[in-house]
Image (cartoon, rainbow, N blue to C red):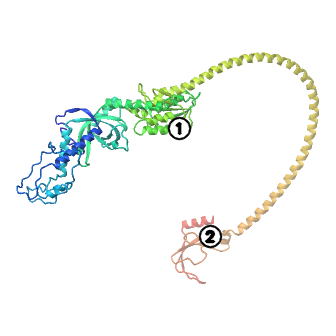
Amino acid sequence: MAQDVTPEEQRFDFGVAATDGTTRGGSADTTTLQQRVRELAATAATAATARPARRGGGASGARATAPPAGVMPADATAGREGCPPAPQLPSTREPSGPDDTGGEDDAGSLDAGDPGALESGIVEESLTVAAFYERVKRALVQAFPEDVWVTGEIRGLRESRGHRYLELADEGAEVGGRAAAQQLEVVCWSREWPAVAAALADAGASLEVGRVVRVRGRVSVWEGGSKLRFTLTALDVEALLGGIAAARRKLLQVLEREGLLEANARRRVPLVPLRIGLVTSPGSEAHRDFVGQLVRSGFSFDVRLEPSLVQGAEAPRQLAAALARLAGVEPDLVVVVRGGGARGDLAAFDSEEVARAIAAAPFPVWTGIGHTGDRSVADDVAQRALITPTACGEAVVGVVASYWEGVLERSAVLSGLARARLDSAHQSIRATAAAVTRGARHQLDRRGDELAGSRMAASRAARSCLEREDGRLAGARAALSLGASRMLAARARDSDRYRQVLRAYDPRRQLERGWSLTRDGSGRPVHSVAGLASGVDITTVFVDGAILSRITRVHVGNGTGDVRTELAKSDERDEVGEWQR
């Protein structure tokens, strides 16, 4: 090969492409390619056993010459079409010399499936694994001297160290059927992927599981994995776009047959949709544009954000899950928005999972995908589709603003009618008020005289009542003051008695009487010699200070122990003072 290859690439590329670098037209599906590979494998296996053999012990000793590797004689497969080669027994003879191969002489491999060969002693050639693969590679070169086009449906897609790996199968093959087992592994090396990725980006397409692709490449065999490989050199983007469009049309037809294409369109938007469910990527430009329109409107929108990816393999599942979660909060309207990007970024919105989630939603769904001129399946299924998130936000605000403008217009009409009725009523009330005022004035004059007499009588009665109550309150005040004085005197006597008891139990009084208090090094009082030992420091507190002693000997009984006494240090005197406090 003219180009440098990595060690990993060398495992799969064995010079299958034409030496002049030209390519051959035409396209084969994976079933046709697998059929040709099986024929090549049968040809290589037959060629491995087709050399003339001589009987063991023959006098001539002549050695048959095998045909060139990869070349099959015209009569070698006569009567054996479709029949597998018989199993071979491994050779057990050791080579006798440098010219002895140990595989073409008397102890060569015997055809265990041919009893006649065993009886006659016919010896056949036994290939090494390397020689077998060499013949397979030559057979592949003969069958595919140039690059070949293959069409298949992507069943698997992965990336490793910059390389892309695709698993292709025939379109529509059942997973459990025989056709589904016929899969072709396609690899695109990292040095060739940028060109393929650029072509996909220019066309606004992307590789997704389930899409049908047409790829060109070289056929090779990976000896380390005992499997066939197809090295991708080109991808038919136009065919991919056509397949995407066909899959989109097919999905729309299925939804229409099931009555789901217009299901969400029949959902009515409330007159004032203020509870909004938002499905988008949090913090994205689409999120900010849509929410910004609602905030600037001045209306009290209640936005419930359900985060979701809007592109990539996980996007369809997350979008459908977000719509399902919003069903539990019963929003007035749900909006699905995303920003601009390549046409291939809309793959999630062309998926059947998202389309069915929108159709089954118990609320109206609006979309603002952000791709001018591009319409997705989600747009067709939704109740309304807008071109951008900003336009979607303006539309939502427009519905509420339209309702509010109608309210203002009707309020103006009602205000005019009410003003006219009020003017008429005001005139009627004014006339009635004049008549009522005259009658009321007459009644007030008459009632005023009556009230003056009643006021004087009430004043006298109130004054008499207040005088009686003042006398009663004075007596109660004197009784309350006397009782409080007696209670305070009793409490004072009790306090003096308690104070005397406390002074009697004050430790300082005991020290003043000549007693002392001894504590150990932890500050606990010492009640007995038990627990004391030689070398332990003890502190003895008197009324006028404290001394620090160290025990030199302890005597249990009526005797006394010898102690060595030192003057208390200043910090220990402080400690004693603190104890006394």
In the displayed structure image, the side of residue 268 where residue 204 appears, left or right: left
Instruction: Identify the residue at the far left of this view.
Output: 60
Spot occupied by residue 471 in the image (x, y as percentages of width and height): 91, 45
User: x, y (%) of residue 381?
Assistant: 48, 30
Question: Would residue 501 be found to the left or right of residue 347 on screen?
Answer: right
In the rendered structure, are the residues bearing label 1 and label 2 in contact, judged by CB atoms less than 8 Å apart? no
Viewer-nearest residue: 511 or 404: 404
**Residue 424, position as x, y percentages in the image:** 76, 15
Q: Dot 1: what SS?
A: helix
Q: Amino acid at mark 1?
A: Leu
Circle on res. 544? 2
* Residue 404 in view, yes or no: yes
Is tag 1's residue or tag 2's residue first in the polypeptide sequence?
A: 1
The reply to whether residue 109 is in sight is: no
Q: Residue at x 93, y 37 (%)?
A: 461
Residue at the spot x=76%, y=62% of the render? Answer: 495
Left or right side of 187 for 103 = left
Image: 101 above or below 422: below
Q: Which residue is mark 1?
A: 326
Q: For mark 2, give the secondary structure.
A: loop
Given residues 331 and 481, the one toward you in this image is: 331
Depth check, mark 1 against mark 2: the one in front is 1
